[in-house]
Each structure stands twice: as structure tokens, then as C-alpha cells.
Image: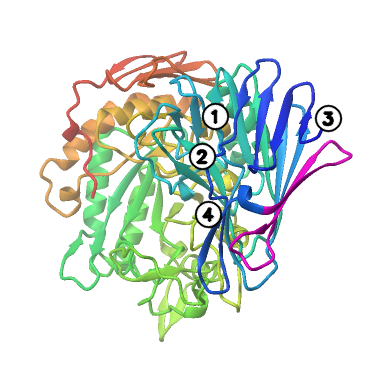
Amino acid sequence: MAKSSGAAMENREIMVRVDVAQGAFDVVQKRSGTEWKMDRGDRADIVVTDACGEERVLSLADAGRRKARMNADGSCLAVYGDFRGVDSSLEVRVLLRLRGEDLDVELDVDDADPKLQFDSLYYPRSFVLPESKKNYWVIPLQGGRLVPSTYRKDIDARLGWKLKLKCHGAVQDRSGMLCLWETPYDVLLGETNSTRTGPKYVPRNMESLGRFRYTRRYTMCFREKTDYAGLIRDVYRSYAGRKGYLVPLAERAREKPRIKDLPGTMMFHQLIAIIRHRKLTKRLVTFEHARKVFEKMVRETGVRKGLYHLDGWCRQGYDALHPDVLPPNDEAGGVKGLGALSKAVTRKGYHFGLHDNYLLYYMEAEQYHDDDAVWDRDLRVFRNRSCTPGGANGVQTPSAARRFVIKNYVTGQNVYRRRWRPLSEYCDLGFCYFDQFLHSGGGHDQDFNPLHPLTRREFVTGMLDVIDIMGKDLGVLTSSEHMYDFAMGHYDINGNSDGVALCDPGEGAVPVPLWNLGLHECMAVTDVDAGPENLVRCGLIGGVLHHRPGARFDYGDDGGALGREVEYIRRAEPLRRLHEEVCFRECTGSRLLSEDGSEQETDFEGIVVRGDTANLTLEISGSRKADGKYDFGDMKKEAGPSHW
């Protein structure tokens, strides 16, 4: 049992000093002497809205009542209440408990007064790292990034749903801290920067349907002699196993044989139609033309297996009128054209997949109804601020998404005396790609509709039940751009760079493969960032590229676009062969070989990949199929595929 004295507690490994007056605590790792000092300067701990509708920003340090109590089990409870400027009952309780090298943090807020609208609690506060390039933050943004304490550029404070592993950490003086989010659904990661303190990262505990509702839990793990790879590989991976997030591909392949086809499969991406809403512009190719493009690509590249991802096949083209996607676009060839294309793709050994969207809910869709849409806290239908090609849209509830997926893929639809056959009747579906499917922690993934209120957790779990219709009931491979750790048991393919690709680092930050170290899942398919640097980064995560032909060729004017695409695929062939070997292997190591992170090394159970993004070289050793050193420095930027 941990010994405690006053506002401090300790055991053999760490000591925690609680500063009740400031609403902070410091941690000392005893063996190394490393001290983690919590920020005292941030005065914005709590955000609420009072009875007059005015937003109030409160600080624990300004509470009129602050006290600490040491419990019999060695834990410390700090209580804060009587906040100035809030004429209502509000009490915050912070419970700290030691377990070896781990510190458990529990947060409770008494916000039962209906006159007070709770918004956010920013806690535990950020530690302040000593200024040094060797001290850095470990942030699982997309694939992962390191942010040194010397970083002074402006940084985006809205990480939101881009944080793929629900944790964050830091390293200083060769000691590490990893904060695991035990209750992840109502948390974002706040991010700030200043010339005085450098980057700071703090969890933002958001409201759940306007209240705090339940205890929020974090486990802060402190480790000696470690780095970012040790924190994620050892600490996080063990945690993910306990939570049930770690579901190996090899294990899933026993239940779904199609998964065995994934090693070494590239994704070929093609677009049929974009029809701009309320404008005269239209871009369209037929399903027959798409078939010719695909067959030419296979013939010229020699790639005999892969994933064929088709965009813009719906009745109104790309991102329009969802969920009314049937029948397939008539001008492109309709039901017969789409069916013939899918069969041609399957005959070549590829899995045929459709891009679809069951999060966005278009207000001009024939089957749109307000009761099936997510409502905001003002009890109005939520509207997305940005319009896609299809016009104004909101968000579907999971029950509506489930109903439409069943209609579109399983049973067919009977609407306004028209019968639409389900896609599974005439398409050889091998996989599905649901765009924007989960936005955990966003502003629209909870529903205030009094007929069917949904918390964020209920919303996310409901949407994962929808994806299981495709994966478990129909047996197709499932994919999305939003790959979170808690959703890994429901997905087979990572179809977009938002999941595991090494993120765009920004000036001074370093991309590293945190996703692979934590969950591995080398089924990774990354978006194409036209240029050779992406080939190097893709090799470091053991992934394969997501290829798409140039836009001009898509719309009927070759212009050499497919030729550039073919050359890019040929240059990426070592990555495809690498992926064949590492797809079912664990990522066991990652390290920086240069101070700026341009040179890195990744280990997949003995297959070592060394990449240099400055000199555009990739070296692979220990592989039977991809051994060698590859130089991409002579590739011109236009050699890569252009985005549509």
C-alpha cells in the first residue's frame, strides 16, 4: 500500500505531490529523479454556460472551496467547489491512486443543477517539458507524430477525430509518461503552443448530452529508460490487449477467408461521376470506360491482385443524396454497367468495392426525414458547415443508417412505386468503404433529439453495429478512413491515410509509426501524396499505396495520366512485396537515426526497413522478396498520380 502524508503520496517507484491550491500535481520518478511538473499557468480548467446563456471559463485555482483528503487505501481525493461567477452548485472531485509505476486519475463533476450547462473540463493539465530537442510529446495523430519541446510554431488546437490511439504521452531525460484514456468517447486532445512554455497537450473532457454524467478515468504510466517506441509497443500494446482492441489479422482470417488475400494488395481507386449541386458542371465517365482503364492498368503494371475502389457510382455521383444511392448512375450505364464492371474486376483477381456514406444525411434526398437526423443541443437538426458536391447535409442516426444499409445491400428498396434491386444481387462485392463513418469526439456524434437521445458512446457503438452488417452478415471486407483503436475488431482494411499513414508532420514535428507499434495491422493502405517521399514513408509502415489514375484520364482524356500512374506503381513494387511478408507480422521496433527524424528504421520481427526522406532512399533487409536499397530521388513530382 502506498504511504501518504498530507497532500503527498508515494511508493517505491514514484512520488506524487498534490498542489490543491493550484489544482495541480507533480510526479517524481524515484530511480531516475525525473520530475514531471504540471502546468500552473493555465486558468481555463472548466467551461460552463449559466442560466443567462453566458459562457463561463473557470479555474480550479479560483474555487472558493478547496480541500484534500487522504483515504485509508492511500489514495488522495481533492475537492473543488463554490466557483466565483457561477450562481449554481458545481463541485469537481479529483481522485488520485498509485499502482506501482502507474497513477490512476478519476474525475467527477456534480453538475446536477439544470440551470447550469456543462461544456468541458480540461484535466489532467499538461506537464511542462524542459526545453530540449530530446524532450518531446508523443501524439498518435493519424499514424503518429513527435513534437519536440522546442517547437514554437502555431499548431492546430482541433485534433479531434484524427487522434487514432486514445492516449498521449511524453519523453524527457530518457524517462517516459503515457496517459491512457480509459473512457475515450467524450474526450478530445487540446493542443496549445507559446514562446514561453512550448507545446502543451491536455485532455478535454466534453459534456455528454449536456451533463458530465459519469466518472472519467485515465491511467498515467511512468517508465524509466524508454522512448516513444517503448511507450507504445510495451505500455500501450499491453493496454490494448486488455481492452480487447488488439484483434490480429491472422486470427480474423480464420473466420473470414478473404483476409488471406490482403498481403501485397494495392488499392486501385477510380471515379465515375461528380455532379456539382445546383451548378451546370458535370464530370462523368461510363462504367464501360472505367473497365477499359482498369484492364489497361492491370495489363501494363502486371499487378494481379488488389482492391478496386469505385467512387461516384451512385445515382447522383460522388457524395450526393446519401443514403438514396440507388439505382446506380444511369448515364454511366446503370445496373447492367455496374454489374459488368464488378464481374470484370473480379475475373482479374481483384476484390471489387464501393465507396458509400452512411454518416452524412442529405436534406434533398427523397427519403430524408428530420426524425432520422441528429439534432444539436438547441433541438434543431444539425447541419454540416461545409457542403459537399451534393449540397446541404446533416448526420444520420445509427438506426437510420442500419435501415438504409439493409435496403441498399440486402433487401432492395420499394419507394414511390419503384423497385430497386439490392447491390448484392448484381455486384460481386469483395469489400465496402464507408466514408466519414465515425467521428469520435466530434460535435455531431451525439443526438439531442428527445425521441431517441444518443450519447457519443451509443452513437459510435450503433455505427459499428452497422458496419458489422457488411462484415459479418454479408462476409465482405470492411474499410473506412476513420480507424480508431476501439473499432479495430470491426474493420479489415485501413483504406485511408487518416488511419495509419505517417502524417504530414508540419514544420519541426516528426512523423513516426505509433499506430503500427501499438496495433500493428499492416493491412495498411495509404493515400497517395504524389511524390517519392510518400514511397519512403509507406515503406516505414510496411504499407502499400492507394493508387488513383489522373483526373483527366478519368474523364475521358488520356493525356498520359495513366502512363504516369503505371510508372508510379512500378516504382512502388518493392513496397507491395514488402507488404506480402509483413502483413501478418508485428511491428516490434522503431527508432530515429537522425535528429530531425528524416532517417528512421522500423523492425517487423526481423525484417528491417530503413528510410531516408531527405535523400529519398529506402533500404530493406531480412526480406526474401524485397531485400535491397531503392533510390527514388530521380522521380519527378509529376510522376505520381494527380488527385481528382
How crowded pointer 2 is (Cα within 10 Å; few <14, some 14-19, many 20+) is rated as many
**In terms of sequence position, does the residue under pointer 4 or pointer 3 come before the other?**
3
Give left or right: position of 540 versus 29: left
Q: Does the CB distance between marks 1 and 4 fall below 8 Å?
A: no
Q: Secondary structure at mark 2?
A: strand
Q: Nearer the viewer, mark 4 or mark 3?
A: 3
- The question of residue 79 being in magenta is answered with yes
Closer to the camera in the image, 546 or 436: 436
State yes or no: discs 1 and 2 in contact (Cβ < 8 Å). yes
Label 1 or label 2, whichever comes before in sequence order: 1
| 227 vs 62, nearest the viewer | 62
Task: Report helix, strand or loop for mark 1.
Answer: strand
**Residue located at (63% from left, 38% from top):** 180
Residue at 33% across / 63% down in the picture? 386
Q: Name the residue beneath numbered marker 1.
A: 170
Asked if disc 2 and disc 3 are in contact, CB closer than 8 Å, the reply is: no
Amino acid of disc 2: Tyr
Q: Earlier in the sequence, mark 2 or mark 3?
A: 3
Magenta span of residues: 64-91
Disc 2: which residue:
201
Q: Mark 4 sits on what residue? A: 441
Direction from residue 167 to residue 554 in the image, left or right: left
Residue 244 vs 216, above or below: the answer is: above
Extreme bottom residue here?
Answer: 417
Q: Earlier in the sequence, mark 1 or mark 3?
A: 3
